[in-house]
Image (tube, rainbow, N blue to C red):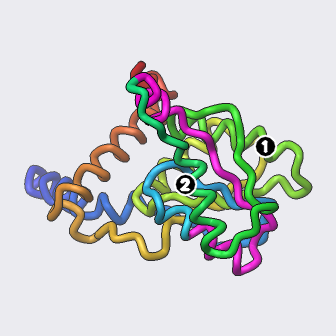
Amino acid sequence: MVAVALVGFIVAGFLNLGRWLIREDPLESVDAIAVLSGRMPERALEAARIYKQGYAPEVWLTHAIEPRETLQKLSIRYIGEDEYDKEILLHEGVPASAVRVLGPPIVNTADEMKTIGRALQTTPHRAVILVTSRVHTRRTRKLWNLLSYQEGRAVVRGVSDDPFDATHWWKNTGDALDVVREFLGLLNAWAGLPLKPAS
């Protein structure tokens, strides 16, 4: 009987893992909307939507090292994800004066949390909306609380039209890979980030 209950618990946990990874906050007025790197153009488009609703006066972009660094070694021109995201924001009606690229360059989400946290130190309300993919919201919240909570308040939001299927995440390779990556990333965060980015 105990074994059956344990198996049932494990199966239920497995089936609900996709929904559990989504942890969004209600929108509120903040100092800036920060677009986390990756999943272009969805995250930038979501940031533009939120900006046009009047929740913040600025949109912040982070400056990712890759793939620019690797492509430069091959003499292949790549202007950078932040530049493409900026073009998306401008296309969607966000004025250039409201777009700010933060430094220094980042490698992963942990770097982004630190960079955005530092930028918040000079803002009046010390609050930011972090725009990411829905499956990435719980880990984003965990990393913010671990690395930058003292710098201010973060509102974590997923892309509103994100195609991630939280209910049936195991039915396609894209969603399944996202869930595995996020779960392993959370384990690393809970352990205090012992695993570092690959060099």
Going by the picture, which residue comes out furthest to the top?
Answer: 199
When asked about the image quadrant of residue 117, the answer is top right
Q: Position of residue 182 (x, y in %)?
A: 37, 47
> Is 117 placed above or below 196 here?
below
**Residue at (70% x, 47% y) in the render:** 101
Residue on which the image places disc 1: 119
Asked whether residue 29 is drawn in magenta, I would say no
* Image coordinates for residue 34, horizontal then vertical, percent: 66, 55
Residue 26 visible to an observer of this rendering: no
Relative depth, front residue between 82 and 113 = 82
Above or below residue 102? Residue 164 is: below
Give the vertical position of 160 relative to 44 (above or below). Answer: below
Quarter of the image for the N terminus: give it.
Answer: bottom left
Residue ranking furthest to the right: 124
Relative placement, left or right, of 74 versus 122 is left
Is 59 placed left or right of 108 in the picture?
Answer: right
Q: Which residues are magenta?
A: 46-73
Q: Secondary structure at mark 1?
A: helix
* Image spot of residue 49 (x, y percent): 61, 76
Side of 92 relative to 133 (left or right): right
Q: Earlier in the sequence, mark 2 or mark 1?
A: 2
Where does label 2 land, which residue? 84
Query: Please, which residue is most extreme toward the bottom here?
Result: 53
The three-letter code of the residue at mark 2 reads Tyr
